[in-house]
Amino acid sequence: MTVEQAQVQGTIEPGFEPLRDLLEEQFAKGEHIGAGVSVYRHGRKVVDVWGGLADEDAGTPWQADTMALSYSTTKGLAATCLHILADRGLVDYAAPVAHYWPDFARHGKEKITVYHVLTHQAGIPQVPEGLHGADLFDWERVIHGIDGEAPIWEPGTDSGYHALTFGFLVGEIVRRVSGKRIGTFLHDEVTRPLGIDDEMYIGAPESAEPKIAKLKSRIVVTPELIAQYQASQANGNSLISRAMGMRQGEMMAGQGENHFDTPAGHRAEVPAANGIMTARALARMYACLADYGELGGVRILGEERVRTMSQRQTNRPDRVIIVPVGFALGYMTGGTEGWPQGPRVTSFGHAGFGGSIGYCDPEIGMAFGFTTNALSMDLIGYGRTAALAAAARACCEALAA
């Protein structure tokens, strides 16, 4: 049936009305400016709804084809590209990164493997010294900077969220092996085959600009938050600032000037942080992974490859974001209380700063995508995102009962 209720519109199949109702309730509480939610179940789209404003200041409504910059949700796209190369026998997870990228073998990085990169164990979460903001749009400058970095810990011995460097590490491996920039590879091998090539980008063309929502911070920097941040810096935990590429004194992404949320930022390729997509495209990509690499007669990965890449590899407190994180090969897994991926470790995907997420749960055949332009203080999908994902999961489970 078609949804035309309050701020939410789109399509939804019977049995998923509680998800629609929750989104309506969240809008009524002011938790969103604009947002899109999409769900696939066993390879079929069952929810595709959206509402609110794409640009709050201009009063522009969120449309069916509105895309949003979705920060680290992009990591799931980048990882999928690398796994396609592994599935073709062109990348070995156990191989040193330097096998594909010879200049990487400097300053103690010689033994860092592709596996270490995908599981955030490489030990180089820090953005190269002197690079901030729009500097990250210069691919060659960042790659040469990474060449000159040394691991902060012995690779493979600990986990630390590579908030920005993950995308450059994965993206450069993809480029060295395929000869294609990762945005082109994503288009050629993922989005075009799946029919979402005008709804998902790492490096959006200028023609896509009118369809990109304008982000707005809803983060309230309280005295308590400032005190927590200052205490972490005083205790020597400046790693989060270095991993996020923040200048001295900056607290978090989404505060102050947002270089990513500009036309230049949209066109750049920062494969850990600046993917632009609809919720529908996110859900469709993960629906393909939920069905072990095939959707609608199109196969992008082999079944065994999906089983391998989605298996949890580590689960321990993270040196950058502190809380324990379960990592598969390039994805965050479920099995952690309060996370949107839910209670099963077989679910996998990636959340993004501010609240966006794309993930799937093969055990129930569900894929979920959420995009938003109201940024919350959220790196892993707590709060409104987890509530929406839980509602979608409950609907799927009820239908299977």
Image: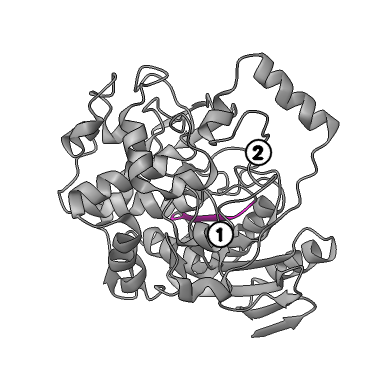
Q: Is residue 25 above or below residue 323?
A: below
Q: Identify the magenta region.
A: 355-362
**Separation (CA) of disc 1 from disc 2:** 16 Å
Q: Nearer the viewer, residue 307 or 398?
A: 307
Q: Residues within 10 Å of mark 1 (few under 14, many from 20)?
A: many
CB atoms of marks 1 and 2 within 8 Å: no
Label 2 element class: loop
Check residue 87 in the rendering and tell me which mark sits there, or answer none.
none
Residue 287 vertical position relative to residue 328 in the rendered view, above or below = below
Taking depth in this image into account, of 356 and 231 the one nearest to the observer is: 231
257 versus 59 height, above or below = above
Q: Quadrant of the N terminus?
A: bottom right
In the picture, residue 286 is in which quadrant?
A: bottom left
Residue ID for mark 2 = 252
Q: Tell me, yes or no, whether the highlighted magenta stretch contains residue 339.
A: no
**Residue at 63% across, 43% down:** 253
Q: Is residue 388 visible?
A: yes
Instruction: Name the amino acid, label 1.
Output: Leu
Name the main secondary structure of what is drawn in magenta: strand
Q: In the shown orientation, is residue 354 left or right of residue 276? A: right
Name the N-terminal-most of marks 1 and 2.
1
Residue 328: percent from left, percent from top:
40, 40
Q: Residues within 10 Å of mark 2 (few under 14, many from 20)?
A: some
Mark 1 sits on what residue? 69
